[in-house]
Image: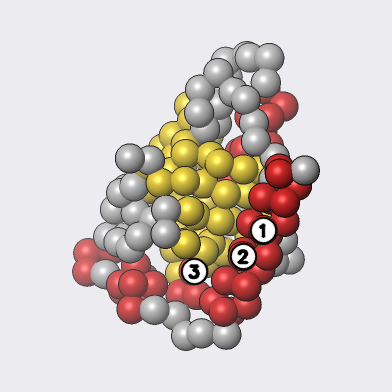
Amino acid sequence: MKRNYLGRSLLMGLLALTLAACSSKPSDVDRRAVESSGGKLDGPVVGQRWNLLLVGTDERLSMPTTPHFVIAPDGRVSGHDGCNAINGRVQLDDGNRIQFRELASTKMGCPQLDDARRVTTMMETAYRYLIDHDRLVFFGPDQRVLGGWRKAN
């Protein structure tokens, strides 16, 4: 019962934040991410390790390694999908748009390989993001919540 309540509360909060984000202008941070000098990215998602919190709105995965990623200022992304190391490129645009490109991974096998693929698919499908305190939420092109990440300490 508590889990279902928590999932609904998280979903309602995310929906409210999404509506607020959709109705506002891109922030100065978004503009800096696009217009920064020398082609370097900056902003709240860059240079921070993000650990997987949820897939969808309420599903937690139990993996051998916590899925995570870091976006470097040069646009490279590196991390782990829970089974394999991943790397690639990321593009950040106005309006909190995000696009992961050229994602590649090692090919280690593990019992949770299907869940690891779900993590990678979430990243490849991400279209927009929203940050609320220490949480990062990915949305698909259809505005559906793909999953959430938590800032690592």
Residue at the disc numbered 2: 13
Q: Amino acid at mark 1?
A: Ser
Q: How many marks?
A: 3
The tag on residue 9 is 1
Q: Secondary structure under badge 2?
A: helix
Pointer 3 residue: 96
Contact, CB < 8 Å: mark 1 with mark 2?
yes
Which mark is nearer the camera, 2 or 3? 2
Q: Secondary structure at mark 3?
A: helix
Disc 2 residue type (three-letter): Gly
Residue in view at x 50 percent, y 75 percent: 95
Q: Residue furthest left?
A: 37
Q: Please state the horizontal and vertical placement of residue 111, each as a whole percent of the image.
A: 68, 14
Circle 1 sits in a helix, a strand or a loop, which is it? helix
Tell me whether the residue at label 3 lies in contact with that at label 1, contact meaning CB atoms closer than 8 angstroms: no
Circle nearer the N terminus (2, 3): 2
Residue 77: image location, x then y, percent: 41, 43
Between 124 and 148, the one nearer to me in the picture: 148
Q: Nearer the viewer, residue 105 or 61?
A: 61
